[in-house]
Image (cartoon, rainbow, N blue to C red):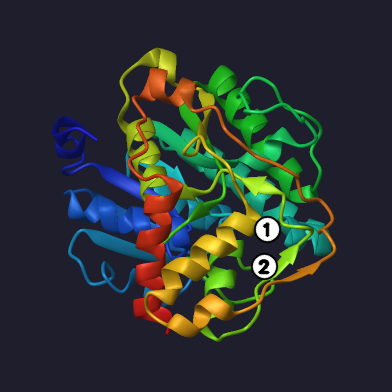
Amino acid sequence: MTNHVLSSLKNTRVLVTGAAGFIGSNLCEFLIEHGAMVTGLDNYATGHKKNLDAVMSHERFTFINGDIRDMEVCKRAVSQVDYVLHQAALGSVPRSIQDPVTSNEVNVGGFLNMLVAAKDNGIKRFVYAASSSTYGDNASLPKEEDVIGKPLSPYAITKYVNELYADVFHKTYGLDSIGLRYFNVFGRKQDPNGAYAAVIPKFVMQLLKHESPVINGDGSFSRDFTYVDNVIQANILAMLTEDTAAMNTVYNVAFGERTDLSTLVASLKELLARFDSKIASVPVKHREQRLGDVPHSLASIEKARRLLGYDPAYSFEEGLSEAVAWYWEHLK
């Protein structure tokens, strides 16, 4: 990002929902570092207090412990801000299959609450975390924003409904919004624990314990793994763009290359073996493919390049190296 963009953050008033989560906490730190006044909202359902240790006592940070399913909480959260970066959600395809009701209550009901609160408070811009899961059963690669298929999970439905609501709120109420379809984000602070842990931190934790990482399927499924700093860049650009042609639409946020799961594990073993040579010989296990999983994901990021000036700074390899170093420091 240019110095002009970064300097524009000074004294902006921003609400980050899901502030104690993986992406939300990284956004809070970045915004505070560049002079913004930040309100963080989270109920710690999936986030962690420790993720906010770096900002919790900062004079330009205010934290609200609350749930986006509570309209009064949403109204209070937006009352002193100009921009919303909405990251709060119950992620995970398997979680949504196990409990579709709660996923819908948070991801759809909570999202609608935030839109209403933002609209009523005259928020300048509502930037929200959309998802590559919206592409569903569309098999074409790379994924382009205007061509989607039918959703393959309750989670995917909730994220697509978010896009529909955001579009209606612009057309009906004039609320400006931008949706960012994240593709398999990874990086520092991503939780390796729990049944619904993302694949990279989960594999790292297993390898650190000299346990075999378990790949769903034969390892040929591939993902456009995206380092968290690229996601931060996209959020800031979406929040600050003054180009009306760039608003009220959705963008892929990715690096634009895909990596299969077998290659991912091999790369993790190689990087972690620099710290612990025994990891190089840890065997890999396989099991049946998960229900609702998409075989391959690969994003076209040309729309974000053209309209937002998005230029991802970290490739998969560069991001993975940064992430592994962080995990070794914090998890070993």
Nearer to the camera, 72 or 246: 246
Which residue matches tag 2? 196
Residue depicted at 64% across the width and 37% down the height:
162
In the rendered view, would you say 101 is above or below 51?
above
For the C terminus, the quadrant is bottom left
Residue depicted at 48% across the width and 21% down the height:
303
Which residue matches tag 1? 92
| Dot 1: element | loop
For the N terminus, the quadrant is top left
Counting from the top left corner in percent of width and height, residue 196 is at: 67, 67
Residue depicted at 50% across the width and 22% down the height:
248
| Dot 2: element | loop
In which image quadrant can residue 39 be found? bottom left
Counting from the top left corner in percent of width and height, residue 87 is at: 50, 50
Asked if labels 1 and 2 touch by Cβ distance under 8 angstroms, the answer is: yes
Query: Is residue 282 at all visible to an observer of this figure?
Result: yes
Q: Type of residue at label 2?
A: Tyr
Nearer to the camera, 209 or 100: 209
Query: Is residue 45 at all visible to an observer of this figure?
Result: no
Q: Counting other residues with Cα less than 10 Å from the Cα at mark 1, is it few (<14), some (14-19), or many (20 or more)? A: some
Q: Counting other residues with Cα less than 10 Å from the Cα at mark 2, is it few (<14), some (14-19), or many (20 or more)? A: some
Q: Type of residue at label 1?
A: Ser
Counting from the top left corner in percent of width and height, residue 310 is at: 37, 30
Q: Is residue 32 left or right of residue 134?
A: left
Nearer to the camera, 76 or 257: 257
Counting from the top left corner in percent of width and height, residue 282 is at: 60, 79
In the rendered view, would you say 200 is above or below 239?
below
